[in-house]
Image (tube, rainbow, N blue to C red):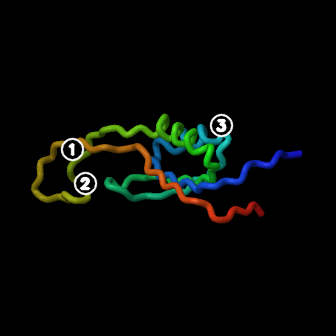
Amino acid sequence: MTSEQPQPTKLCVLVVSDTDANRLMEQMVEAGFSATKIGSTGGFLRRGSVTILSGVTTDGMDRLMELVGEVCHARKEFVPVQTLPFLGDGGFTSEPVEVRVGGAIVFVLDIERFERV
């Protein structure tokens, strides 16, 4: 006999770095959150990212955000200037440029209807 899980009231859409995604998914599952991982790309450096969808109860939101904060740290990295989309290969210096990478973008949407079929 399986116990009924509480109905989610929020849909969390988390966009995280490839490097943080697997660890975040592991931590989420360990904490009892269900999640679906979708590969995606984009952003400032056009690097790999992952979009994670998770239905969460209102009470679970604080714990989820704690996990995201623990796992998805923003950090600084030096990248070659030629890889930056806005500079291209114009006559700029070849010195690496420091940019912020990592972290997470989290969208929280109210769920109007939820069904498990």
Q: Is residue 88 found left or right of 37 in the rendered image?
A: left
Name the kind of residue labelled 2 in the image. Leu
Residue of label 3: 30
Specify which label sits upstream in the sequence, 3 or 2.
3
In three-dimensional space, the C-alpha distance between marks 3 and 1, rounded to whole angstroms, equals 37 Å
Q: Which residue is mark 2?
A: 84
Left or right of 83, for residue 62: right
In space, the residues marked 3 and 2 are separated at their CA atoms by 37 Å
Q: Which element carries disc 2, helix, strand or loop?
A: loop
Dot 2 alpha-carbon crowd within 10 angstroms: few under 14, some 14 to 19, many 20 or more? some
Residue at figure coordinates x 26%, y 53% from the top left: 83
Secondary element type, mark 1: strand
Image quadrant in which the C terminus is located: bottom right
* In the foreground, 38 or 8: 8
Residue 99 % position (x, y): 27, 44
Q: Earlier in the sequence, mark 2 or mark 1?
A: 2
The reply to whether dot 2 and dot 1 touch (C-beta < 8 Å) is yes
State the count of labels: 3
Instruction: Please tell me whether residue 76 is drawn above or below residue 42 in the rendered image.
Output: above
Q: Which residue is mark 1?
A: 97
Which residue is at a point 62% across and 50% down the rendered structure image?
Answer: 56
18, 109: nearer the viewer: 109
Q: Give the amino acid at mark 1.
A: Val
Q: Residue at x 39, y 43 (%)?
A: 102
Mark 3, residues whose alpha carbon is within 10 Å: few (<14), some, or many (≥20)? few
Q: Nearer the viewer, mark 3 or mark 2?
A: 3
Dot 3 falls on a residue whose secondary structure is helix
Q: Earlier in the sequence, mark 3 or mark 1?
A: 3
